[in-house]
Image: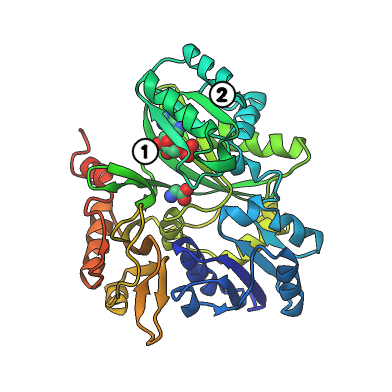
């Protein structure tokens, strides 16, 4: 394919650095722009100054620079309708419109869609009213899950093990604890099982599988401590066997895509399904309308095709003619290095060195919350700072390679978990267990 595409990537996290890295390797890519970007993304793209919330400014930039494709990384601009604006102006965009992005933006929307389309998910009730929500608790056994309906940066979910905890969660949400996201709550049945994430690309009609992953959400080793955006991940998720993956496509993902198309709000982009593998089979916990962070880092480490061409085919509704996306049979594993204090208030400003040495081990360090100080020194500027990502023939090997790369990095005000992948490592070392 000739190098012809001009792509604009929006976002500034580790996910976007991984996307930028893979886009930059695409044979079809001629020029990559990114906004707002970060110092890692700046190594792959020309950083441009653009306010992503100013949709008109994004359109003007695209016209001026003959952009062939806009790739929207995070959920906020999707839920805000940026893709709608771009499409209306004839600009190809990877990412769903505002209406189908409700799959991520509203838990109640997704639950109702599951009911209509017969998609397996936890039993639930939606409530706008505090009294009715409290009364509903009677109809659920403990533990029960209480969720703020809207976007709450992954924090709007409470697993209540006692009635008091459930009551507190409901009071907190209706009391404005999660702002507008808590104006409605979803109360749902607790599902038992192992979690896994599954990714699929769709242009509204055709659906292609795009890999699987598992992450570690808790801040500390042994999966304890506060919830975070993700302290590490690996791909593939071996618990999601080919048989289970086929069921997820058949029972969950395809019916979702069809239901949205039938409702006149076709979904275009990546569908990130958070699944619980229960004894009865896979059930949907939630959808995200974007790639995961740090799941994108491990997916990009394994994806072997032309990402720019593939994402453009999604945007232009040409997936029907596209072959299955090729992935390496290797395992990829990423370890997040966060700033001390995360997920509370992170200590910013700490110097980071050794990234080139880490990359020289064969790993790839994706940058998230980094910045350059006035002297050009790389410093921490956010909670999750680096995602150190490596490949290997097994999880054991990928894990060893990731931690070998971390050993080359000097980041005294950072911390990381030393047990990323533990569950899978245990299974590898004791397959019968
Ligand atoms: P969500 O933001 O909906 O993905 O929920 C965050 C986390 O809460 C999930 O990754 C699960 O670990 C847990 N969770 C959410 N819903 C349930 C459920 N119905 N049963 C068990 N765990 C759940
Ligand atoms: N790592 C979880 C997410 O991106 O939502």
Q: In terms of depth relative to the viewer, which is nearer, 352 or 419?
A: 352
C-alpha gap between disc 2 and disc 1:
39 Å
Q: Where is residue 218 in the image (x, y as percent from the top left)?
A: 32, 45
Q: Are marks 2 and 1 in contact (CB under 8 Å)?
A: no
Residue situated furthest right in the rendering: 89
Above/below status of 331 relative to 205: below
Q: Position of residue 320 (x, y in %)?
A: 69, 51
Residue situated furthest front in the rendering: 175
* Quarter of the rendering occupied by the C terminus: top left
Describe the element under mark 2 as helix, strand or loop.
Answer: helix
Residue at (66, 74) in percent of width and height: 5
Q: Quadrant of residue 164?
A: top left
Ligand 1 located in image quadrant:
top left
Q: Name the residue under label 1.
A: 239
Q: In terms of depth relative to the viewer, which is nearer, 67 or 307?
A: 67
154 with respect to 34 (left or right)? left
392 with respect to 245 (left or right)? left
Q: Is residue 418 visible?
A: yes
Residue at (46, 15) in percent of width and height: 140
Disc 2 CB within 8 Å of nearest ligand 1 atom: no
350 with respect to 182 (left or right)? left
Q: In terms of depth relative to the viewer, which is nearer, 362 or 81?
A: 81
Q: How many marks?
A: 2
Label 2 neighbourhood size at 10 Å, few (<14), some (14-19), many (20+)?
some
Above/below status of 262 relative to 326: above
Residue situated furthest bottom in the rendering: 375
Residue at (37, 87) in percent of width and height: 375
Q: Mark 2 points at which residue?
A: 130
Model colouring = rainbow
């Amino acid at each position: 394919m000739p190098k012809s595409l001009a792509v604009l990537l929006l976002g500034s996290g580790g996910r976007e650095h991984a996307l930028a890295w893979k886009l930059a390797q695409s044979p079809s890519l001629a020029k990559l722009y990114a906004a707002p970007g970060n110092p890692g993304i700046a190594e792959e793209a020309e950083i441009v100054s653009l306010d992503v919330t100013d949709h008109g400014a994004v359109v003007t930039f695209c016209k001026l620079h003959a952009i062939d494709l806009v790739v929207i990384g995070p959920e906020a601009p999707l839920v805000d309708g940026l893709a709608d604006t771009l499409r209306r102006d004839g600009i190809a965009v990877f990412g769903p419109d505002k209406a189908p992005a409700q799959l991520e933006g509203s838990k109640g929307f997704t639950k109702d869609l599951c009911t209509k389309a017969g998609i397996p998910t936890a039993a639930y009730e939606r409530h706008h009213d505090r009294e009715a929500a409290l009364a509903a608790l009677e109809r659920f056994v403990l533990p029960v899950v209480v969720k703020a309906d809207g976007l709450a940066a992954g924090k709007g979910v409470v697993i209540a093990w006692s009635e008091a905890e459930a009551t507190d969660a409901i009071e907190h949400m209706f009391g404005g604890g999660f702002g507008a996201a808590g104006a409605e709550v979803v109360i749902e049945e607790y599902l038992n099982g192992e979690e896994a994430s599954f990714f699929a690309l769709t242009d509204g009609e055709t659906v292609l599988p795009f890999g699987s992953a598992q992450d570690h959400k808790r801040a500390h080793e042994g999966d304890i401590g506060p919830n975070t955006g993700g302290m590490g991940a690996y791909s593939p998720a071996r618990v999601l066997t080919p048989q289970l993956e086929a069921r997820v496509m058949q029972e969950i993902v395809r019916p979702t895509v069809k239901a949205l198309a039938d409702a006149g709000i076709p979904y275009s982009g990546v569908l990130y399904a958070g699944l619980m593998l229960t004894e009865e089979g896979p059930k949907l916990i939630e959808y995200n309308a974007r790639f995961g962070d740090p799941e994108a880092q491990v997916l990009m480490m394994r994806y072997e095709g032309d990402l720019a061409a593939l994402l453009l085919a999604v945007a232009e509704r040409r997936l029907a003619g596209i072959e299955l996306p090729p992935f390496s049979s290797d395992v990829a594993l990423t370890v997040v290095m966060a700033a001390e204090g995360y997920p509370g208030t992170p200590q910013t400003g700490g110097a980071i060195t050794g990234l080139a040495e880490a990359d020289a081990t064969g790993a790839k360090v994706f940058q998230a919350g980094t910045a350059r100080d006035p002297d050009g020194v790389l410093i921490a500027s956010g909670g999750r700072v680096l995602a150190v990502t490596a490949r290997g023939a097994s999880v054991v090997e990928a894990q060893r390679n990731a931690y070998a790369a971390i050993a080359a990095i000097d980041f005294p005000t950072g911390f990381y978990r030393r047990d990323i992948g533990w569950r899978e490592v245990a299974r590898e070392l004791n397959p019968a267990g």
